[in-house]
Image (tube, rainbow, N blue to C red):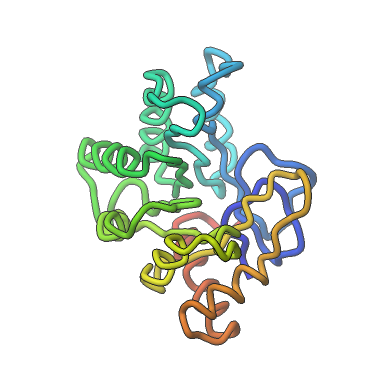
Amino acid sequence: MVDAHTHKSSSASRHFICEPFYGPVGENDVKFYGHHPWDFLENLPPENWLENLRERLIQDPSAGVGEIGLDRLKEKNIPSIMEEAFLSQLSLAAELNRPVVLHGAKCWGRVVSTVKSVLEKSGSIGKRQSIPAFLFHGFSRSDGLIPEIISLNGFISVSSAILNDHAINYRKMVSEIPLDILLIETDYTGEGDCPSLESIASMLAKLRSLSVTDLEHILDKNAHRFISSLPTP
C-alpha cells in the first residue's frame, strides 16, 4: 500500500515523500522537491532558491514537485511572496512536465484557481496538460470543488483525520469523493508516532462499503496513475 504523502519513510511498502526528508529514502519511494508555503513566512529561502530547485529537478527526472501551495493557517491574508513562489513553482512544474503535490490549508479555492490560471497560460488543461497530475494533499473542503479537481487530473489524499469520530463533515466529504481519484496519506513529519496507514484504510473501506483488499487495489492503481508520467527510478 502506498503512503501518498509523507516526509519520512515508515512501514508502508512505498511512499511519496515531500521535502524535508527525515531519514533514508527507500528505493521504491518517489521524491517531491519543492518549497512549502510556510517557507515564505519566516526564514526565507536564499535568493537563488528557484534556480536551485530547477537544478535538483533536472538532475532527478524521477522526482515530482511538492509540496507547494498557499496557506491561511498561520496568517489570515496570503502574503504576496507566498503567492509568487507558488506561481513560480507551478510554472517550473509545467516547464518540466512533473506531477505536483498541493497544500491549501483554509484556501483550497484559491489554490484551484491559481492552478487553472497557470495551465491556461501554458495553453494546456485536461489530459494533455503541461502538469500531468495534481495531488490535493489533506484536502478538507466541501465537495463543491471536486468537479474542478477532476478536470485538472487531480487526486485527493485522505488523512488520519478520518479516524476522529467527531470529524463528521470530513467523513461525509470523503464518502463522496470518486473512488478513482482517492489516495491515503499519513503526512508523517518525523515527530511523534506515525499514523497507521492500515487504520486509515480500514476506516475508509468502511465508509465506502468496500473490503480493505478491494480498497487497497483501487488505491494502488490510483497511486500508479498519479506518478505514471515520471520515468521509472
Rendered view: 29 above or below 204:
above
Q: Quadrant of the C terminus?
A: bottom right
Looking at the image, which residue is at 34% across and 56% down? 142
108 sits to left or right of 171: left
114 sits to left or right of 56: left
The picture places residue 164, in percent across and down from the top left corner, at 59, 62
The picture places residue 124, in percent across and down from the top left corner, at 23, 46
The picture places residue 59, in percent across and down from the top left corner, at 58, 37
The picture places residue 123, in percent across and down from the top left corner, at 20, 42
Looking at the image, which residue is at 45% across and 66% down? 225
Name the foreground residue: 159 vs 120.
159
Looking at the image, which residue is at 54% across and 28% down? 38
Rendered view: 50 above or below 215:
above
Could you say which quadrant of the image residue 23 lies in? Answer: top right
Residue 127 seen in the current view? no
Rendered view: 78 above or below 25:
above
Name the foreground residue: 230 vs 102.
102
Looking at the image, which residue is at 31% across and 38% down? 110
Residue 60 seen in the current view? yes
Q: Quadrant of the N terminus?
A: bottom right
Name the foreground residue: 129 vs 102.
102
Rendered view: 93 above or below 226:
above
Tell how many labels: 0
Residue sitting farthest toward the top = 47
Name the foreground residue: 114 vs 162.
162
